[in-house]
Amino acid sequence: MEEAKPDATNYLRQCHNKLWTRSQFSTICKVDYVTNNLTESFNNWIKQYKSLNLDDLMDKIRQLLMLKWNQRRKIGKKLDGLILPHIIKLLNEKSRELSLEVAECSKEVAEVTTLGGSGFRFVMNLVDRTCSCRQWQVSGISSKHTLAFVTSLANEPIEKHVDFYYSIEAMQEG
């Protein structure tokens, strides 16, 4: 894009850099995917109430959220472990067949190199919960680079390297 339309690239960097590139996303909100599905799902959830006055619509949305959070609390009370089952499944899938080389700097910091091909290097810090690919910071779920490092350490549970947002405790709190 930079070669074909340099003006467009400059415009996007100056005016919309936080919107169009994941590398610029805030790390406050944790999300492991970025699509329009969330918006479409929300619109479908409230479509029968869109004809209400604004005050009534906002109150209905408040009520729907209250019911949803209560439903999640009830589900959370039935779960065991530290993190949500679908996150454990995702981490297990990510940790299979990793072709990465781990160079441990300390118990908390390592450099992971992609084998065969690009040879890209990524630095992660377990204490700061950062990986230079930024996936861990943006999603709250360990990147494959972090998983390679964590699984190379003795007695280091992968559950410890997932944001509280994905914990069963957070779900129980609603």
Image (cartoon, rainbow, N blue to C red):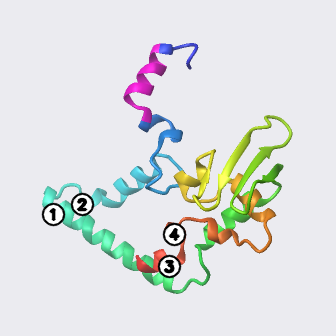
Q: Mark 4: give few (<14), some (14-19) or many (20+) Cα within 10 Å.
A: some
Q: Who comes first in sequence, dot 4 or dot 2?
A: 2
Please name the residue that numbered disc 3 is placed on. 169
Mark 1 and mark 2 in contact? Answer it, CB < 8 Å. yes
Q: How many numbered dots are placed on residues in this image?
A: 4
65, 30: nearer the viewer: 30
Residue depicted at x 72% and y 52%: 145
Q: Which of the numbered marks, if any, corresponds to residue 66?
A: none
Please name the residue that numbered disc 4 is placed on. 164
Q: Is residue 157 above or below residue 42?
A: below
Mark 1 and mark 3 in contact? Answer it, CB < 8 Å. no
User: Magenta segment, which residues?
Assistant: 7-17
Q: Which of the numbered marks, if any, corresponds to residue 49?
A: 2
Does dot 2 land on a helix, a strand or a loop? helix
Image coords of residue 66 (percent x, y): 31, 74
Q: Mark 1: give few (<14), some (14-19) or many (20+) Cα within 10 Å.
A: few
Q: Who comes first in sequence, dot 4 or dot 3?
A: 4
In the rendered image, the quadrant that contains the C terminus is: bottom left
Mark 4 and mark 3 in contact? Answer it, CB < 8 Å. yes
**Mark-to-mark CA distance, 1 and 3:** 32 Å
Q: Who comes first in sequence, dot 3 or dot 2?
A: 2
Please name the residue that numbered disc 1 is placed on. 56
Per the picture, the main secondary structure of the magenta-coloured stretch is: helix
Position of residue 66 in the picture relative to residue 115 (left or right) = left
Instruction: Residue type at mark 4: give it.
Output: Phe
Point out the frontmost of discs 4 and 2. Answer: 4
**Mark-to-mark CA distance, 1 and 2:** 9 Å
